[in-house]
Amino acid sequence: MYDYGVKISTAVTESGFPVAYVVSSPHIHDVQLLENLVNEAPIPHILGDKGYISGFVQDKLAKKGVTVTTPLRKNMKHADKIDDVL
């Protein structure tokens, strides 16, 4: 199997300054790269997209003092109530 392209996941500060990055195959899921990013730049609060939704990984990072906030998927429980507030 051939990989065409790369995926670059970055961690940036609130002002947009990059502090860490991970380069991987485009076939690797975002949530698998999240722990590597946190190890490179221990940021206490992470705002990620829907690709970072994983209760297991979020619980694991919470034990390290890292909070991961993501928007909910439309098929998730109570997603409609939260979307109305946002």
Image (tube, rainbow, N blue to C red):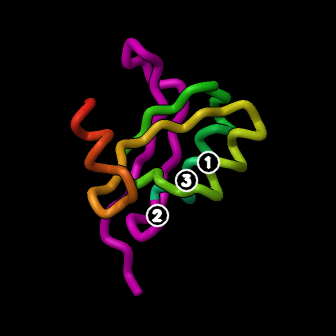
Residue at mark 2 to residue at mark 1: CA–CA distance: 15 Å
Q: Contact (CB < 8 A) between labels 2 and 1?
A: no
Q: Residue at x 52, y 46 (%)?
A: 22
Residue 19's place in the image compared with 47, above or below, is above
Quarter of the C terminus within the rendering: top left
Tell me the SS state at disc 1.
helix
Does 83 lie within the magenta span?
A: no
Which residues are the magenta region? Answer: 1-29
Name the residue carrying label 3.
33
Q: Where residue 74 appears, x then y in whole percent?
A: 27, 57
Name the residue carrying label 1.
58
Q: Amino acid at mark 1?
A: Gln
Residue at mark 1 to residue at mark 3: CA–CA distance: 13 Å
Q: Contact (CB < 8 A) between labels 3 and 2?
A: yes
Counting residues from the start of the chain, the first of labels 1 and 3 encountered is 3
Residue 2's place in the image compared with 45, above or below, is below
Residue 27's place in the image compared with 17, above or below, is below
In the foreground, 24 or 34: 34
Name the residue carrying label 2.
29
